[in-house]
């Protein structure tokens, strides 16, 4: 989203922006068709849009309408909705990258950028909630069984979305559209370098560092608990969530790195920053289409997944994690009959 020439578009005054009659003198021609990297990223993003849109729509349909409503399906449904919304707006990013100008107007400039960060924060907050949920379920199985309900899960999902919307507001405030050299540019019109630094650092800390620490602690505790009880022969309880979390951080780390480098843009090549942010944005889009793929194929091994129907594969991927943890909890507590097969 923030893949524009920072030095050219960062701190414009009104007088520095070309007026319409001045801009008409210039005819902007996109350099993307002759750029191998740009064309490659366009093709990748187009494929990701198709796979992400269809895949997340399928997850929403099955987890929302075809499966029994449980805590697990509540988590996955919300994640799929977040990714689906992002994929819906991905064509705006693709067209902007191809044309190297913004043609969709002032409102969509602000709204499309906000959707990117809404997806980032809502996804990571949900992953944090799920990790804490798994940790509590393993350490306190009886308490978890008595207090873990769909209603409470839904409330946590709403809270995560509210916080994500709040942290996405700076994009709606600071994104702007201006004309320069015969083209419209959707860019970040920060009021000062300090404002830019504060926003970039707050996104990195709230959307990356703190969640990574919390998730790492939760899974370390879970693994330690299972090893102490010598119940780690099966890795099924962690396959889906571990893959989802690893994919999220791998896809988002390059984006954050280049956004942080942009704070001191004078020390780096503008071409490198632009290319890095385009690649980072492409990896972000990859996270949204990889999630439904992981839902389908992480429940059982690949051969078994191929033999089953599409719906069965997705139901198994979502439900297998809960069933396997429940079997462990049943063996490690004295209340076998009270534990559900879906936690």
Image (cartoon, grey):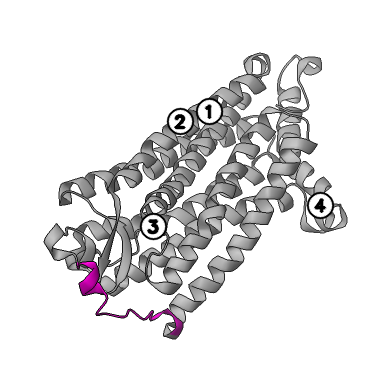
Q: Which percent across, then down, holds residue 230?
A: 67, 34
Secondary structure at numbered mark 3: helix
Task: Name the image quarter holding the C terminus.
Answer: top right
- For this rendering, which residue is in front, 37 or 181? 181
Residue 340 visible (yes or no): yes
- Contact between marks 1 and 4 (CB within 8 A): the answer is no
- Name above or below for residue 92 compared with residue 144: below
Q: Which residue is mark 2?
A: 162
* Occupied quadrant, residue 252: bottom left
- Contact between marks 4 and 3 (CB within 8 A): the answer is no
Q: Residues within 10 Å of mark 1 (few under 14, many from 20)?
A: some
Residue for point 62% across, 26% down = 138
Residue for point 31% across, 72% down = 272
Q: Which residue is mark 1?
A: 158
Q: Which percent across, then down, holds residue 242?
A: 59, 45
Mark with earlier residue (2, 4): 2
Magenta stretch, main secondary structure, is loop
Mark with earlier residue (4, 3): 3
- Contact between marks 1 and 2 (CB within 8 A): the answer is yes
Secondary structure at numbered mark 4: helix
Q: Which residue is mark 4?
A: 310
**Which of the two marks, 4 or 3, is nearer to us in this view?**
3
Q: Residues within 10 Å of mark 4 (few under 14, many from 20)?
A: few
State the extent of the magenta-drawn residues as a range: 18-33
Q: Label 3 vs label 1: CA separation?
A: 30 Å
Q: Which residue is mark 3?
A: 105
Q: Residues within 10 Å of mark 2 (few under 14, many from 20)?
A: some
Secondary structure at numbered mark 2: helix
Q: Does 136 sit left or right of 33 as displayed?
A: right
């Amino acid at each position: 989203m923030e893949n524009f020439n920072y030095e050219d578009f960062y701190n414009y005054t009104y007088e520095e922006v070309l007026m319409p009659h001045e801009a008409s003198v210039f005819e902007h021609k996109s350099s993307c068709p002759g750029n191998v990297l740009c064309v490659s990223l366009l093709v990748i993003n187009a494929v990701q849009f198709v796979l992400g849109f269809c895949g997340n729509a399928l997850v929403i349909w099955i987890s929302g309408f075809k499966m029994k409503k449980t805590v697990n399906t509540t988590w996955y449904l919300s994640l799929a909705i977040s990714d689906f919304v992002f994929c819906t707006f991905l064509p705006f990013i693709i067209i902007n990258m191809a044309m190297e100008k913004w043609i969709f107007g002032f409102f969509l400039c602000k709204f499309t950028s906000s959707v990117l960060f809404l997806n980032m924060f809502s996804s990571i907050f949900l992953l944090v909630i799920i990790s804490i949920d798994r940790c509590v379920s393993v350490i306190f199985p009886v308490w978890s069984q008595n207090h873990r309900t769909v209603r409470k899960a839904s409330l946590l999902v709403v809270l995560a979305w509210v916080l994500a919307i709040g942290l996405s507001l700076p994009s709606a405030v600071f994104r702007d559209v201006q004309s320069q050299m015969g083209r419209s540019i959707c860019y970040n019109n920060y009021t000062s370098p300090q404002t830019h630094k504060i926003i970039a650092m707050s996104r990195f800390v709230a959307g990356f560092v703190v969640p990574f620490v919390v998730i790492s602690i939760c899974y370390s505790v879970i693994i330690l608990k299972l090893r102490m009880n010598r119940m780690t022969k099966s890795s099924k309880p962690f396959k889906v969530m571990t893959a989802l979390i690893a994919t999220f951080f791998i896809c988002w780390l390059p984006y954050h790195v280049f956004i942080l480098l942009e704070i001191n843009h004078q020390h780096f090549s503008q071409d490198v920053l632009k290319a890095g942010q385009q690649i980072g944005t492409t990896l972000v889009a990859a996270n949204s289409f990889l999630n439904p793929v992981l839902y389908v194929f992480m429940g059982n091994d690949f051969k078994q997944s191929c033999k089953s129907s599409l719906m069965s594969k997705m139901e198994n991927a979502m439900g297998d994690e809960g069933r396997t943890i429940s079997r462990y909890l049943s063996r490690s507590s004295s209340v076998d009959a009270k534990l559900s097969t879906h936690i």
